[in-house]
Amino acid sequence: MQRQIVYSESSAIMVTLSGDRGMLTRFASLVAMLAFMASAAGQIAIVDRLPGTPQGIEFRISHVEVNADIVDQVAEVQMAQTFRNVSQRTLETQFLFPLPDEVAIHGLTLIVDGKELTGELKPKDQARSEYEAIVRKQKDPALLEYAGQGLYRTSVFPIPPGQERRVEIRYTQVLKNDSGLIDFTLPLGTVKHAGQPIDELNITIRVNSKDELKNVYSPTHNFAITRPNDNKAVCRLNLKNVTQPDDTRLLYGVRGGEFGMDLVSYQPDGGEHGYFMLLASPKVKMKEKHDISKTLLLVVDRSGSMSGEKIEQAKSSLRQMINQLGEKDTFNIISYSSEVTLFQSELELVSDSSRKAALSFVEDIYAGGGTNINEALSMALKQLNDHHRPTYVLFFTDGLPTVGTTDETAIAASVSAANKVHARIFSFGVGYDVNSRLLDRLSKEQRGTSVFVKPAEDIEVAASNLFSKVSALVMTDVQLNFTGAHSENSGQLVTRMYPSELTDLFRGEQLIVVGRYRTSTPVTVTLTGKVADKSRETKLETSFGNSDATRRNQFVETLWVTRRIGEIIDELDLKGQNKELVDELVALSLKHGIMTPYTSFLADENLSLHDRSGLMSEAESRSEQGLSVAYGSDGFLQRSYKSQLKAAIRPGSDALSGAAEEVGNALDSGSPALAGSGGRPVGPNRGARMSSSGLASRLGGFPVGGGGLGGSGLEQNESKSDAKDSDESKVTATQRIRHIGIKTFYWKNDEWQDSEYGTLKEDAQKDVVEVQQFSDEYFKLTNMNDGRYSKYLTFTEPVLIRVDGRNYRIVPPQEE
């Protein structure tokens, strides 16, 4: 009989296994691709997840359910996990629960099937030595991620074979209030290495406050947030088949009048300009009912290509919008094909009779003819003459301009000349046949947005979502001004704000503005605008923080970078190529690991990153070829992706990654010159599949891969032989990138390389200090600056990292 300990990061679960040598041998072979086997005496298998690799272990987490009730800055948290023993032996289980950093936790208890389990709570200073001791013993760096946090360690309990245990963790947490924003964190990252995917993850957070809630925002997850009233918010998240859940973070603000504002800032180390995110929300229920009269022009395509289901959906959308018009609104309907037809010759005031007549007009719309976009928009805009009234043009089309003026720049110029009242134009592109670049040009120049509806999607849903927002108009002519402590104005204090053209404020929506600030200083933020023709002003007294005070807010930088990349692509798309912009696109993508269809080649294992001119040349070629396509699926998907980048509300969303991959796949299939740009590997030979020999073996040999690009002219590292390539599994570009904290790592030369190192000049790259994992020198690194760098040293593969201006290569220990 022999005992074996399996350590997993899942909630820092330590499982002791008992069984005969044959069973242990079978278990060891099961995890051989995923574990480092220590000495034969007291054999230890450290189970660790590598990117994209499922683990085969003897237990799994089937469900995780979290309920958190927050009342006036105090959170009552209950986290329940269902563990199933899928082995044929009893698992002796112990839990290590890392405590959220820098928060006060009370009354933490752990309950197994209704019975409370004894445990020991240790502050972070004592916990650090425990984490380090486990890492030394288990030869597994995973726990270093939690060094610097407190620890709750339970006694051991058994899980018989084939049975489940429901484990509940309950605690009370006093939340921090940072400059008016209350910060709540759930440590879900501890379940991300549970072996098999978690079947279902449910989180419900209920926020109740005696003060009125204003902004509610999560930088980590896309919660469904409902606001029953001004003092309550319910945030729900449901995820299935979850492989690597991140810690969940929720921020909410309770200050402000009818318009609440909150500021989150982040300044990197080294005196670099900071990043900020401003949240602004109107009250859920305004004390005064402000009926803001507005004008809406509904311009709908009825060309032959709209026949069938599309025209019926468009007509249904028109009916819905007509029925939702306000009593003081004015409106008109313009339908167009080769010719343009107006509902009325001039704007119509909403009344029962005008509404009835408009519905009758919609019934008579039928599809047929060409597409005269220029004439339709020109005739619509000529009806407008009130410069003070908020005016919106909802413009629908499913095709290219084929009648009258067809040149996109000429159409855009004509619309600008006709739009004398500065109406906002919202463009709906329906299907892949639209000139998506024209729609983006119109929306940007006329202060609106573009909405792209795929062929299989419902026009009515997209139109209803936008119209519902426009119908709940709260404030127009929105402006922001930042004044520093020494009377610096906005131009001196902040730069590069996105969106650069602020939208109107609508009830139920949250305005999110990101930008850069030059220095840490107290600041007054002033929001001005008009509410029902009356000027309103809201002030926020806050500060742009320094690097020490804002360390947890690094997500703000990533969000700013995401939007900035969208703006760069937009500039390249609408104004043509610009070497400085391409250089910035490459630099941002490289540093932050945001792989666009035009920069995904950076993840190629055999590509040297210090050849900056070569990288620029490649990105310039890819973006120029891709963005030259104005219509069809390639054009449609590129502009849709660009719009998502520009409107991103949180960094690193799955939707953005999926959109980038979809664009890349479309470009791959449509243009051989762009093969590989969809987040796939890019190799030195056209059409060749690239291998990642070291990473592929560590990923357990799962066959994934993609096409290649030839003739790039980029400096390549020595490639593997064709014979070896044919035997190796392939990995995708996204698997070659890892984001940890503020750093991005790329898989290069059979090791993870810090992007900061990769961009150094060749001479600077030669100066590398080699450190063996789990040595005394290794733990000195993990403890530098109070453990700030420990989370970057959790790789089980070799890693080359740049710390405090020095290069370190961390190599696995030699086998004994």
Image: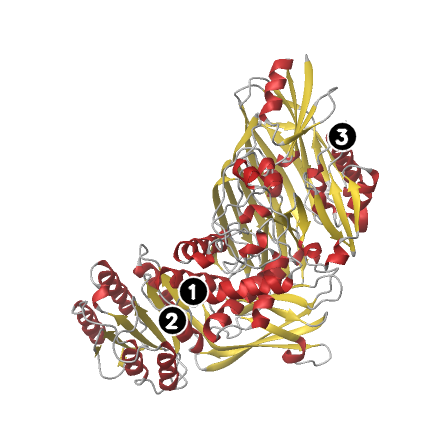
Mark seen at residue 75: none
Distance from the alpha carbon under mark 3 to that under mark 1: 52 Å
Q: SS class of the residue under badge 3?
A: helix
Residue 204 percent location from the top left of the image: 51, 46
Please count the marks in the image: 3
For disc 1, the neighbor class at 10 Å (few under 14, some 14 to 19, many from 20) is many
Residue 146 percent location from the top left of the image: 70, 42
Residue 311 percent location from the top left of the image: 23, 63
Q: Quick check: 683 above or below 451? A: above
Q: SS class of the residue under badge 2?
A: helix
Residue 698 position by quadrant? top right
Residue 438 position by quadrant? bottom left
User: Where does label 1 land, which residue?
Assistant: 639
Mark seen at residue 439: 2
Q: Amino acid at mark 2?
A: Leu
Q: Quick check: 485 above or below 800? A: below
Give yes or no for contact between labels 3 and 1 (Cβ–Cβ under 8 Å).
Answer: no
Mark seen at residue 137: 3
Front residue of this view, candidates 758 and 329: 758
Which quadrant, please, contains the C terminus? Answer: top right
Q: Amino acid at mark 1?
A: Arg
For disc 3, the neighbor class at 10 Å (few under 14, some 14 to 19, many from 20) is few
